[in-house]
Image (tube, grey):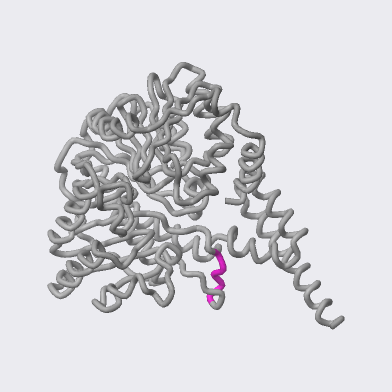
Amino acid sequence: MEFLWSSLSLLSLVGSIGGTVHLLLHYRRPASAVSWLFALWFLPLFGVALYLMFSVYEGPRRVRRRRRLSRRLRERERVVRGETEGSDESEYEDRLAPVAERVGALPPIAGNAIDLHADGPAARAAYLELLRSAEVEILLETFSWEDDAFTREVVAVLAEKLAAGVDVRVLIDAIGARRLFDRNLRGLIRAKIPFERFLEPNPLKGRFQINFRNHRKILAVDGKRAIVGGRNCVLDYYETGDDSIRDLTVTIAGPAVEALRNLFLEDWIVATESLDEEPVDLGAPAAVGDTVVRVIPHGTDEDRDAFLPLLSAALREAESEILIVTPYFVPGISMTHELEMAALMGIRVRLLVPRRSPERWPDIGARRFFGSLLEAGVEIYRRPLPFIHAKAIIVDDKRSFLGSANFDQRSFHLNYELTCEIPDERFSKALLEHFAPDLELAERLDPKVFANRPWHTRVAENFVALFEPLL
């Protein structure tokens, strides 16, 4: 027994030292680092296990390989940019250009057309139409996938296209689709559709982490058109009614699809570990419209994450109005200050969130930030059912951000996300009109009523907020 305890003590010490060295080499947020140091040294073995599962990223070798692949593929975006040079870009875009250049963001690409899906049924029709139009290639990436009426219809089209010689690839996050014995994936398995799970935890391969999930949603077809946004491959996202999920997706056609296709191929090659694969060059898509799109991938292995700097720059350039729509709101201190400062400077800042989300912890944690925002003049609206899962930020009717990222710490720092920046006045106004009914249905939070909430509610909010740096 004494030998056992000695061995466990030694193992705990080695794990704590190793975790500390790794943390000090790679941490990004000091508050999170302090919390992890506490866990590593005061929760023997358990703290080390938590660190492996929740904080250790993919690993230096995998990250370096992905970055090399990323640089190679993204050279194509610069070629596409050169071929579409000369299209009009707004004065507002010019003011953001220095920030974009310094953080290494992908260039904005002109010549696109964008179609906003009005509701779930419209999104379903657009999704299936795009799949049926495929002649060469279908690339489908999603976080969640369930075996239901919608995905069975999708699988039927994929099987038909695969039999016709179309290159079909499906990429699903390993945690987002996890069910006992792959129950949700049995349709794909039976139809022999080529699919991969993204970063499935596997201790035998040194992958312990359950954080750092692939939260992106992309459907790219023939390198010409793509659907992006927040909808997963789950029936509830494509229906209406209180039991459905209200979300946002768009169809993009034109040169920006090349960047979306390349992003999928990066994720696919990392998931399959086929790092020597040379993607087929389908050629640069032709310009089909006059909308500018910047594709912003963000995740733990980006050379320098461009999303937060670009978002901060856009918020600081606001002159009259900011609307943020998000299902989960845990902004952290820095983004809270950005929103407070905008409101204090006379900008109308509105936040649209669900009245209640399926996950209680983020709801409780969000309220920790509401008080100071309300005091600064931010308007907070809580929408009743159906649950709103849309993610969008609109600045001054001129610039929009939409995609898979929530306004929370997980999307800012942990997940692999995709955001599209669209500096287009017509599209931004259409997006505001899209959310106008939601704002009318939503209840505006009264600052006085909120300030008088019970003490035990405040205790719960502050307790949950303690874990925000670890998320």
Residue 349, image quadrant: top left
Residue name at image x 34 percent, y 59 percent? 142
| Residue shown at 69% from the left, 50% from the top | 35
Nearer the observer, 384 or 424: 384
Q: Quadrant of residue 167?
A: bottom left
Q: Nearer the viewer, residue 100 or 397?
A: 397
Q: Is residue 293 within the magenta segment?
A: no
Image vertical order of residue 304 relative to residue 220, above or below: above
Of all residues shown, which one is farthest toward the top?
Answer: 346
Quarter location, residue 9 = bottom right
Q: Is residue 275 visible?
A: no
- x, y percent for residue 368: 58, 37
Question: How far across and down, in percent of the image, does residue 178 sit?
Answer: 43, 68
Q: Residue furthest right?
A: 2
Q: Which residues are magenta?
A: 205-209
Q: In what quadrant of the picture does the N terminus appear? A: bottom right
Asked if 267 appears above or below 107 in the picture, the reply is below
Which percent across, then down, holds residue 139? 26, 62
Magenta segment main secondary structure: loop
Give how far across and how far down residue 293 sits, in percent. 28, 40
Instruction: Judge from the rendering whether residue 323 lies leftward or rightward of residue 240; answer left or right.
Output: right
Q: Taking 50 as reference, is 133 left or right? A: left
**Callout count:** 0
